Amino acid sequence: MKNIFFILLVFGFYANAQPKFHPPATPSIPVVDTLHGVLLTDNYRWLENKADSNVITWTKAQHDYGIEYLNSTQKIHEGLRNDIANYIDMDYEGPLNKEGKRVFQTIKRKGDKQYKLYTILNDKPVLIWDPVKLDTSGNTSTQGIAYSYDGERAAVSVQKSGAEISSTYIIDTRTGRILYPALENTFGYQWTKDQQHAYFTIRTQDDVNNQTPLKTYLWKVGDPLSKAKFIGTTNDAKNSFFVYDNRYSDVSFYGEGDFYSNKAYMFKTGTTDSGALIYQGEKSNAYPEAIGDKLYIFTNDNAPNYRLMVADVNNPAYKNWRTLIPESETVMQGYVVTKHNIIIQDKKDIQSRLTLYDFDGNKIKQLELPETGNVAGIGYDREEDSVYLTLNTFTSTPKTFVASASDFKWRLYYQRILPIDMSNIVGEIKFYYSKDGTKVPAFVVHRKDIKLDSNNPVLLNAYGGFQAGIQPGYFGFYASLINRGVIVVQAGIRGGDEYGEKWHRDGMLDKKQTCFDDFYSCAEWLIKEGYTNTNKIVAIGGSNGGLLMGAAATQRPDLFKAIVCEVPLLDMLRYDKFLIARYWIPEYGSADSAKDFRWLLRYSPYQNIRKGVNMPAMLVTAGANDSRVDPMNAKKFVAAAQNNDGQISPVILHMDYNSGHGSGQSTKQSIDNWNFIFEFILNQLQL
């Protein structure tokens, strides 16, 4: 009895010593709307104006308080930061990249703020691009590199602080000399076939803020930007304009589309002819490739699992397309046309493989892989007749192999070795059943000595949207957590591409709730199978996955100990009115439509915070420079949650003031951010 009293006394002192969560107050300023006959009150509409001084002050106060609160309540895990740095900050030499007769390599040494670009001259690497020379803070990063076909020039796009508003520099790839003034506010740079011109799109911050349809231009390299010739745009900012030449043919393509459908025109390369309409899909897409006199078309048109079609350049209309390799029960992921054959990459139960076909579409054989692993990617260099293959496993870094397309005798081309201990870690592909009886895949990665005692800490992640599915890959990033006993689980919920376009469509628009149900079913399965319990599950997801986290917090708070909600979409009635979010209307719908409004209102996290119901502890992150998901989503949700009667667990807003949607971070910034998130996870899991 005496011991029990002592334990209770100590526990009481400990509990009292924990600071209560008292974030800065958020005033409620109601705005009343009537949408499709429904009266709605938005108490935190004022937080949408990120330029308002009151919003700036409130945001900083919330951010600072969150750091202060966590610093006073969390323990520090020795070695965690070093573990993260071992993955992010170390000597790195990327694979050799052949362009024309030139060879390039991305290299980053321990302590470098950003990746640098080198070319190989006289068997020695020569530095030709370092973004830190533009910005010594390290907050300017390389966003993309487009090489001319001969490799003698490169268009290097950079972004500052993750804002995704790019500047493009044309450099001489032998000396690194910048040849012309920077092309400001340009993205999607593509060299034309003659290498004397380029296509690019103009996107300014005003275009993003005002949701202006973007314009694409043809530019003669070296001319003032003002001389670029306008070639196309769209009527609505939810669509994109595209144009591209073909290296091995004299025809080019242009058109417009959204995420899932498009129309395409073909025109003679080197002209600005209007061309001929060759494809128009309402719920499918096709982006042809021309090689010689043949068109190859990888499409989901009347084929949810995709098929490869072919046509003659002289008869390119859709009615003349014929199926070369038909749709099957597995999901076709892509193709490569070599000088000798056609390679098809498909996946069965989310594991990829390669199959060889002749030019008439007859199957030759299944290609034997050089090692056991998942096919992460395949490419072909037509000039040197070489196929490059990348294989992934859960516990070893990716390996790239190369072989001739005539004999497929593979040799190891590149593997990055990391100082990360994966010796006691194993990854498994599992399957569970969702609420409606659908079988769903999941990756379960854990220490080999795991015991199914229902008491293991779990980090559960999913995305479920935009055809972005899970595929086996290296889990070294999570090794620090896994070696501390955390089971890392990735669920392949609907909305992705795990089982083709039907799998995706079963998780979009009015079926979005299916994604959420798949996620909850995964947590319930983990509990049922003895992996864990509800006090040991932390959920994490970002962007569209952040929407999933918001749904989990509001719909199933009973399932999770804590939630990390990164750069999220949370106000689904107004998301599409900000930044580039109109692009996503085909995925979610828009509250401007009465039909769409009904399903969005049912699940939108901001509108579905239940009065008096405590949600799990939440870390909600946002990027101040995010050009994709407006941070208003995070701010409004946090304000509403904190002011909800009955909310006891902390709901913390964490702003990244030097980042956007996650890209472009300096080495130190990336380490700082992940250390902050991992510390939150480990503390919530009581490790």
Image: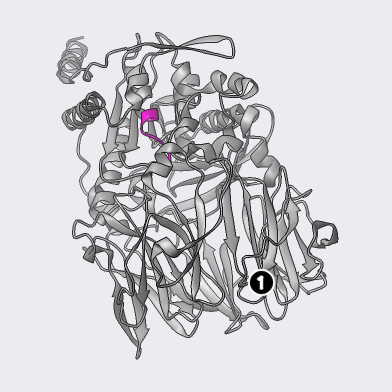
Residue 68 pos. (x, y %): 17, 30
Question: Magenta stretch containing residue 632, yes or no?
Answer: yes
Report whether 300 appears left or right of 84: right
Q: How many labels does the image show?
A: 1
State the residue position of label 1.
Answer: 368
Question: Magenta stretch containing residue 416, yes or no?
Answer: no
Residue 468 pos. (x, y %): 56, 46
Residue toward you, 524 or 547? 547
Quarter placement of the N terminus: top left
Determine crowd level at label 1: few under 14, some 14-19, many 20+ residues with C-alpha closer than 10 A.
Answer: few
Q: Which residue is drawn at 26% across and 45% down?
A: 658
Up the image or down, 566 lies above or below 554; here it is below
Amino acid at pointer 1: Glu
Up the image or down, 41 lies above or below 149; here it is above
Q: Quadrant of residue 628?
A: top left
Specify the segment rendered in magenta.
628-633
